[in-house]
Image: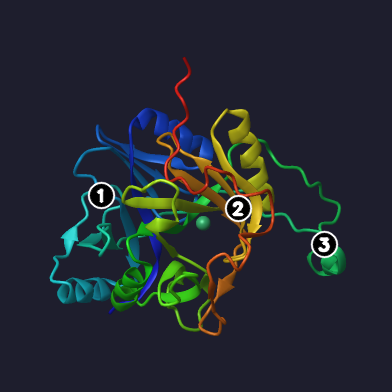
Amino acid sequence: MITIEDIAYVRVAVDDLQEQEQFLLDFGMHPVARTDRALYMRGAGTQPVIHISELRTEEFRPAVGFMATSLADLENFARTSSADVEQNAEPGGGEIVRVMDPSGYRVEVLHRPPVDALPLRAVKPSNFGSARSAYGRFNAKAHFERGPSHVLRLGHAAMIVRNCDESLEWYARHFNLKVSDSYFSRDDASRHMVIFVRCGLGKRFTDHHTLVFVDATAFKELPERGFDHTAYEVLDWDDVMVGHDFLAGAGYMHSFGVGRHIAGGMIFDYWRDSAGNKVEHWADGDHVNDDYESWNVPAGSVPFKSWGPEVSPDFFVQRVKRPTPQ
Ligand SMILES: [Fe+2]
């Protein structure tokens, strides 16, 4: 077993690379490379690539990329999973090991150098009640430029799986992922419907969830193999809202939000990309470590949000395409 440091990227299928690039630019990512078959985008953080769009084919399999802590760990993982360490020929480079998970997702584990972060505006201090004297904004305007959000990094991927417990067993055994919170079936307490897992970094704090396993039966329509959603951290709460206004103004398809989740605590806003895949902007999520007290509760017993609108009817549909204008 090795310990994964963080999630790096996802690989999703789309129908039109040009449309997808325009959406992702407006969503707040930056182009890295584009070929006949694939589009590579980055955030403002130090990962060279956080999002890969591929033209849909019969052979396509969705993939998640993870960062190994060291080259020695990557070699160790290759040995124990009877796979090879290869040179990664895609943008971002480094070394890569490719395996398949029990639900048929490709899992790509990398060791690759970081890139320089892009310049960003400062996160402005806030004047909240009694915290004002410690964190205050004094003689400074709360003014934000209109435009796309500033995507920093991929934060998590929610994977639709045939069995959450099977996925948990596999990812915990290979990558030392830990359960943060979980929701079990009301019909069968031994079967989970949703499990939130994080990187197992011991006392070091990390995101509340890096992967989410979601049981396929939770969907209104039979889902394809693939993500329920992928989620990108942006600068702050104002950045979520500024990006919301920008995407809405550009006529993109909104899914659900803005609100604050209970599991993970982030302020969230969900959109649909050019292929109808659900993508999330988020900010201000919970950081947890091994002292975190997990919940394991019946599905539906904890509200989806602390605040925010009602869940949209399309939220539990995996892919929603905008109707083509006649
Ligand atoms: Fe999410």
- The amino acid type found where label 2 is placed reads Phe
In the image, taking residue 268 as reference, residue 238 lies left or right, namely right
Gap in angstroms between the C-alphas marked 1 and 2? 27 Å
Q: Nearer the viewer, residue 67 or 254?
A: 254
Mark 2 CB near ligand 1 (8 Å cut): yes
Mark 2 lies on a secondary structure that is: strand
Which of the numbered marks, if any, corresponds to residue 268?
2
Q: Residue at x 36, y 72 (%)?
A: 165
Instruction: Look at mark 1 in the image and give the residue it sits on.
Output: 61
Position of residue 226 measured from the top left corner of the image (x, y, whole percent): 34, 51
Q: Residue at x 28, y 79 (%)?
A: 1
- The amino acid type found where label 3 is placed reads Phe
Q: Is residue 291 visible?
A: yes
Q: Residue furthest top?
A: 326
Q: Indicate which label's residue lies in the foreground, 2 or 3.
A: 2
Mark 3 CB near ligand 1 (8 Å cut): no
Which of the numbered marks, if any, corresponds to residue 128?
3
Position of residue 164 measured from the top left corner of the image (x, y, whole percent): 37, 67
Label 2, residues with CA under 10 Å away: few <14, some 14-19, many ≥20: many
Up-down relation of residue 16 to residue 107 (above or below) = above
